[in-house]
Image: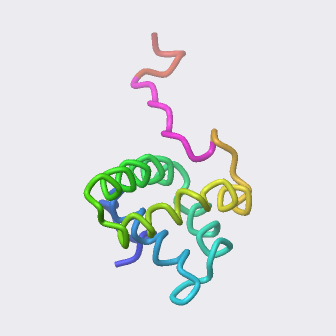
Amino acid sequence: MGPLTDLRLTAWEVVHHLIRVLDSSQGGGEPAAAVLIGKLGAKAEPARELCYRLYTMCERKKRAADALAYNGLVQSWPEIVRLAGVGPATIQQPKQSRLIDEGEE
């Protein structure tokens, strides 16, 4: 199942889809990752935060191969977001909607 059709998409899955797409031998590099981030919207920001944490954990546990993949995404993130044409406000968590309309109070 792809990240755009998965109804229960997790940050973990988003991270690994982005890593896969970012890998130029399997995907399309930063431009392809930018397209995916643009489509994911608010789901992208938790993935970025998770990626930082996973990189740190891999470094501590001396898992260089895994750390390299996470670091690649972390390092590419600013360019990917720039290419996606989305600002920080677009990829942050959505605001909670109100349960009562203003006119109903």
Q: Quadrant of the C terminus?
A: top left
Q: Does the magenta portion include 98?
A: yes
Residue in the foreground of this view, choosing between 51 and 33? 51
Relative to residue 28, is residue 73 depicted above or below?
above
Q: Residue at x 53, y 57 (%)?
A: 74
Q: Quadrant of residue 36?
A: bottom right
In the displayed structure, does residue 41 sit left or right of residue 58? right
Q: Is residue 25 on the magenta stretch?
A: no
- Residue extending farthest to the front is 62
Residue positioned 57% across, 61% down in the render: 37
Residue plotted at (46% across, 30% down): 97
Q: How did the renderer colour the structure? A: rainbow
Quadrant showing the N terminus? bottom left
To which quarter of the image does residue 100 belong?
top left
> Observer-nearest residue: 53 or 86?
53
Magenta stretch: give its range. Answer: 90-99
Q: Is residue 43 shown above or below 24?
A: above
Q: Is residue 89 above or below residue 83?
A: above
Q: Main secondary structure of the magenta part?
A: loop
